[in-house]
């Protein structure tokens, strides 16, 4: 990778110069929203779905994004091209902007808008072969009527607490339950279990982010002709599942082989999870929208 360019409020700046005021309400109060988007071989995966979710989050918290959805999409594409990375993770952040020390969002005249593009893989490659060990934690998923998990807000303290608990247990990821004890999701990924060839994932009302990868996986599972149910399930169902896996933009599709000390299946990534990862990786390239190629002049639509 050569110079990394960050889009910051209408300009491209270097990483060293990408700075935001300490009066930014995203910094002071977690007041803002974000998205994580993936580029595979120069193809942006499900850009429209990510942008739809970003604008839904903005609407929900009454945050004025200073670009139309089409304009913002073009900005993100241009930032990928500028950085010349074929396989990238894009972080889009829109904060309420600079105000005073009070909470009042009306004091924030203009949102701060940031687009960061960098190469990334959260889990080491081997973990896709060996699978992950995870735990469930005491930190509960936010109740949807408190701070809706459907809003991808900058308030990720809950998720950070999950990671702290995971690390204390000696693992790198964990599952949160909702306030009724049903399994909700991981700190940055959705969860699926498989039993007798049928896939299960928690329905939206359990309280999880509406994952773009989750939805892509649901499409693939259905196309492959497997049964899939969006149904609440408990830790018991996870412990006794044939296969368990997590999905996310950064995590992709990753097998879970142990949960709270219970070995899942035979302790190695299951056949259906492996099949799904292969299909998912084919899909992300074939379905994505080409925005950058090392060989060709990039095309912006
Ligand atoms: N849940 C949470 C809390 C997340 O932060 C993420 C990552 N965006 C996900 C689920 C997975 O969503 P997606 O597939 O859209 O990345």
Image (cartoon, rainbow, N blue to C red):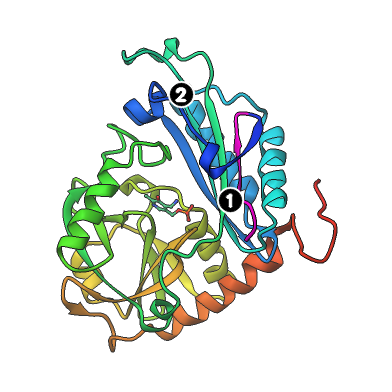
Q: Mark 1 points at which residue?
A: 117
Pick the residue in front: 52 or 15.
15
- Separation of marks 1 and 2 at Cα, in angstroms: 21 Å
Q: Give the range drawn in magenta.
A: 1-9
| Percent coordinates x, y for residue 141 in the rendering | 26, 46
Which numbered marker is on residue 96? 2
| Percent coordinates x, y for residue 214 in the rendering | 47, 59
The quadrant of the rendering that contains the N terminus is bottom right
Which numbered marker is on residue 56? none
Q: Is residue 223 visible?
A: yes
Give the image quarter of residue 243: bottom left
* In this rendering, position of residue 203 left or right of residue 114: left
Pick the residue in front: 58 or 230.
58
Relative to residue 103, is residue 7 depicted above or below?
A: below
User: Does the segment drawn in magenta span residue 148?
Assistant: no
Give the image quarter of residue 257: bottom left
């Amino acid at each position: 990778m050569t110079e990394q360019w960050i889009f910051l409020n209408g300009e491209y700046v270097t990483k060293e110069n990408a700075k935001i005021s300490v009066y930014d309400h995203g910094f002071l109060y977690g007041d803002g929203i974000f998205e994580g988007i993936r580029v595979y071989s120069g193809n942006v995966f499900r850009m429209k779905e990510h942008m739809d979710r970003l604008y839904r989050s903005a609407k929900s918290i009454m945050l004025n994004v200073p670009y139309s959805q089409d304009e913002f999409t073009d900005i993100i594409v241009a930032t990928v091209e500028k950085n010349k990375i074929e396989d990238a993770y894009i972080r889009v952040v829109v904060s309420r902007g600079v105000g005073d020390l009070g909470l009042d969002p009306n004091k924030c005249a203009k949102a701060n808008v940031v687009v960061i593009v960098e190469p990334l893989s959260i889990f080491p490659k081997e973990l896709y072969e060996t699978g992950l060990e995870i735990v469930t934690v005491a930190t509960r998923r936010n109740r949807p009527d408190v701070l809706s998990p459907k809003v991808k807000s900058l308030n990720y303290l809950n998720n950070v607490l999950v990671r702290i608990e995971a690390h204390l247990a000696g693992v790198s990821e964990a599952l949160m339950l909702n306030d009724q004890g049903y399994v909700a999701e991981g700190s940055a990924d959705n969860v699926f279990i498989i039993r007798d060839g049928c896939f299960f994932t928690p329905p939206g009302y359990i309280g999880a982010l509406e994952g773009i990868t989750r939805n892509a996986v649901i499409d693939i599972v259905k196309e492959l002709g497997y049964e899939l149910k969006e149904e609440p399930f408990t830790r018991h169902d996870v412990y006794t599942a044939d296969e368990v896996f997590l999905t996310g933009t950064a995590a992709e599709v990753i097998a879970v082989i142990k949960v709270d000390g219970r070995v899942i299946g035979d302790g190695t990534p299951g056949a259906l999870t492996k099949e799904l990862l292969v299909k998912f990786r084919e899909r992300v390239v074939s379905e994505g929208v080409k925005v950058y190629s090392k060989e060709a002049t990039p095309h912006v639509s």
